[in-house]
Image (cartoon, rainbow, N blue to C red):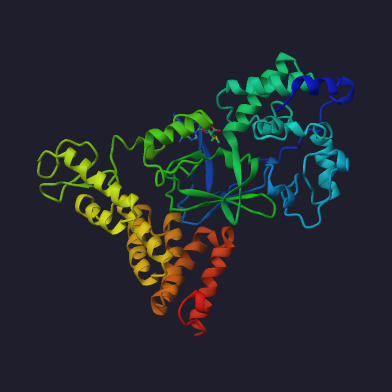
Amino acid sequence: MLDNHHLTRRLTPAHIDLRPWPPIQLPALAQWEQQQAKVINTTNAGRSVIATKKLSSGALLLSERACIQWLYRGPQRQRYCFHCFHRVNHGVSCRSNHACQWDIIYCSKQCEAIQWWRQHRWLCRFSELDVLDTVDLLLALQLLPGSLDDLDSGMHDPLYDNQIERVCCRLFYMSSPHFQKALGRTLGQIRCNSFAVKQSHDQDGIKGKAIYLTGSMINHACDPNALVFFDDQDNSIQIRTCRSINKGEGIFISYGPLASREPSIIKRKEILQQRYFFDCQCDACRQVITSSPQQRFIKCQACMTGRLERNQARCEECHCAYDWDELTKQEQRIEMYLARDAFEQALKIQRQIYDKDAHIIGQTLDQLAHFYAMRGSFKESAKYSRESLAIVCKTFGPESIEAAEEMLKLSTLLFNANLPQEAKAQIQKTIQVHRKLGLDQQNPEDFNELQTMLFLLYNARYKCGIGSV
Ligand SMILES: C[S@@+](CC[C@H](N)C(=O)[O-])C[C@H]1O[C@@H](n2cnc3c(N)ncnc32)[C@H](O)[C@@H]1O
C-alpha cells in the first residue's frame, strides 16, 4: 500500500525536479490506408469512422504506432522494452541499477534515456506507484495537459480525484486547481481512448495499455465489422475489416463486450457504462425493437414452423399461445444434462424446442466436439464440429473471425481423424479465410500449423493424425 506520509517525508520538493518533463511529440494523425475511411460526426456517438468505398473482408484500414504506452507489471517486463515495447534479447537496465526497484529493462540505451528524462528519474524511487490503479495517472503525467486535445474526453470519474490527490498533490506537491482540472480531463481521455495491448500469440495475455490517436476515433459495436491486431515487434496496431462493408457504412471495433459471447444487452451495456461511461447505441444493442433471426429462435409448439423470441405471447404464423412454463421445464432439463456433461441428451431437447440454426445449439455442438476430441474420438468430434461451423457461418458469415476460429478447429480434427481428402479441402479453405482476415500475421503459430498439416497431407507422410506423424 502507498504510505503517503512516509513517502512525503522521504521526499522534499528539493529532491524532485518539477520542471516540465520533456513533452512527448505527438505524431500527426495516421492516414487511413488508401483513403478507405473518413471521420464524420454522428448525433448519438460523437465522431464515427465510415467507409468511403466498398471494402472486402480482411481489408487493411489502418497501421499506427502508439503515441504513449505503459507496460504492465508481470513476466512481460522481462521480455519487452519498458519504453518502446520491442522484444528484448539483451536488456539494458535503468541507470540507477540496484537502486531501481521497478523490475524493468530496455532494448537500448536510447530508450532508457528517453524514459529516464521523460518520467523515470522521479518515479525510480517510488516502486509503490508501480501498481495497476495508477497506470492512467502515470500515462497522463507523460503528457502536457491538453496534448490529447483531439480525443474524446469522456466523463469525469470521481475515482480520479482520489488518485490525483493521493499521488500528485501529496507526493509531488502539484496542487494547483488548474493543473488538477487539466489532469482530470486527460485521465478521462486516457480511460475512454486507450487500448489494452494484447500479445499477438496469446489473445488473452494483456501486455499493457496504449493510446493510438487515429485508432481511437473508431467507435464500439458489440457485433463489430473490424478487428484490431497488435504487432509484437513494435507495438503498432493494424485495423482490418472482418466483414465486407458497404460505402458509407460505419466501421466499428469492439471495446470488449461481444454479442456473440454475451447475449444479454443489459449486461453488455453495464460493462461499457462502467468501464467507459457511455450508453452503447450500436445496432446489436438496439435490436430489441427489431428482433433479429437469432433472437427469434424458439419453435412454436403448435405449428413448429413459426419462430418466437423469448416471452412473445403468440406465434405470428398460427396465432397459438405459447406455453412458456413448459419451455422453462425443458430448459431446466437441458441445464441438468449439460451440468453432467450429457451433451447429447441436452442437444436432443434443444433440437426439439429451438430452431436448427440457433446459436445456442451451435454452442452445444461445440461442447460435444470438444468432449469427443478430448477422448481421442476425432471422427465423432469432427461430425459435431462440421455442424457447429455451419451455424457459425450462417450467424456471422463464412469469412468472419468466428468462422475462422471454427474452421481451424475442424481442420485439426479432420487431420487427426485420418480423413485426408476432407482435411485437405478444409485446411485450404481455412488458410484462405485466415489470410483474408490477416490472421496469418496475427496468429502465426496457428497459421504455421495449418500449413504443416497441409504439407504433411500432400507429402504422403501422413499416417493417422498428428500424434503418429
Ligand atoms: C474511443 S472514442 C471513439 C471516438 C469518439 N466517438 C469521438 O468522438 O472521439 C470512445 C467514445 O465514443 C463514444 N462511443 C463509442 N462507441 C459508442 C457506441 N457504440 N455508442 C455510443 N457511444 C459510443 C463514447 O462517447 C465513447 O466514450
Is 181 above or below relative to 326?
A: above
* The N terminus - image quarter: top right
In the image, taking residue 33 as reference, residue 372 lies left or right, namely left
- Residue 219 percent across, percent down from the top left: 50, 38
Q: Farthest residue in the front direction?
A: 340
Query: In the figure, residue 173 lies in which quadrant?
Result: top right
Is residue 52 in view?
A: yes
Q: Residue at x 83, y 44 (%)?
A: 112
Q: Residue at x 61, y 30 (%)?
A: 189
Is 390 above or below relative to 75?
A: below
In the image, taking residue 347 as reference, residue 422 lies left or right, namely right
Q: Farthest residue in the top direction?
A: 177
- Residue 26 percent across, percent down from the top left: 72, 37
Of residues 27 and 406, the one drawn nearer to the viewer in this rendering = 406
Is residue 30 in view?
A: no
Count of marks placed on residues: 0
- Residue 88 percent across, percent down from the top left: 76, 54
Q: Residue at x 72, y 35 (%)?
A: 130
Is 86 above or below relative to 189?
A: below
Query: In the figure, residue 113 lies in which quadrant?
Result: top right
Query: In the figure, residue 374 lies in which quadrant?
Result: bottom left
- Residue 229 percent across, percent down from the top left: 57, 52
